[in-house]
Image: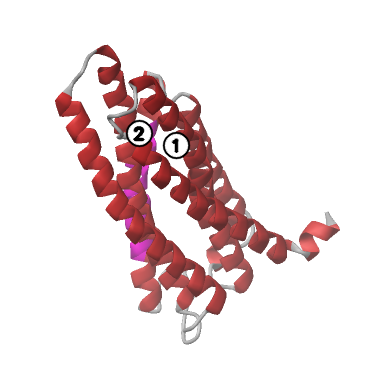
Amino acid sequence: MEFLITNELAILRWVHILSMVYWLGGEWGVFQTSYHVTNRNLDLAERRRHMETAYRIDILARTGIVLLLPLGLHMGKLYGFVPVLEGAGVWWMWLFFLIWLAMTWTAFIKRETDLGIAVTRTEEFLRYPLILTLFTLVVLAYNGSGPIVSGEGTYWYPTKMGLYAFALIIGLFLRVVMRRWTVRFRILAERDDPAQEAALEREIAQARIAAYIYWITIASICFLGSVKPF
């Protein structure tokens, strides 16, 4: 226990880096696999196997993106940026995000069922107030108020939080696309449906454009956390 207390910040930073790696690497894996998911020259069974692979890769990215925020807030508490988390506050914060992580894994494990789709929809819906809250905190921090303490030389922290919120918006769109994969492949398993094929190709083409913006945003978050330029 003494080791954990002494090295609390270093351990959090280590897990934070791992989460970022899995987030970025996982999204690249899903991006590459999506080409096979929409390839009409492959039979449906093989395309579904690639979809399964994409889901198995994506759960690492989803885990990483969920963990990044509580890890960042916890480190922010240690830096003195989030004093509201002193005492029991940090444990309530972790409880909230562990419930979110449990929902994420439930949606993954039950992804081929109606329950999985329902949990995915709920998890997606809960992102909206979270995104709004994060943007509000960023604005308040820049105005010198709110629970995030920031000033000259530490504005990188709320800026990083704002970029994370923007990444959640992109991730929300990508999650919707992947959820629709399950529904569309259910229909394609029953019958040939050109409309479903066209929608699948259109949505993944849009998701690939979003993915490039996603990676630039992730790289920017990494830069701010490492360089702390302002």
- Looking at the picture, how far across and down is residue 65, in whole percent? 49, 51
Q: Secondary structure at mark 2?
A: helix
Distance CA(mark 2)–CA(mark 1): 9 Å
Look at the image and say whether residue 1 sits in the magenta stretch. no
Residue 54 has which mark?
Answer: 1
Which amino acid type is marked by label 2? Val
Predominant SS along the magenta part:
helix
Q: Secondary structure at mark 1?
A: helix
Residue 10's place in the image compared with 39, above or below, is below
Q: Residue at x 30, y 54 (%)?
A: 210
Q: Which mark is residue 37?
A: 2
- Disc number at residue 88? none
Q: Looking at the picture, does residue 196 appear above or below residue 98?
A: above
Q: Nearer the viewer, residue 130 or 164?
A: 164
Quick check: 50 above or below 10? above
> Is 123 included in the stretch rendered in magenta?
yes
| Nearer the observer, 1 or 193 | 193
Q: Is residue 102 visible?
A: yes
Q: Residue furthest right?
A: 2
In the image, which residues are magenta? 120-136
Of residue 104 and residue 219, the one placed in the foreground of this image is 219
Query: How far across and how far down the image is residue 207, in percent?
Result: 29, 47
Q: Position of residue 204 (x, y in %)?
A: 28, 42
Tell which circle, 2 or 1, labels the residue nearer the N-terminal end: 2
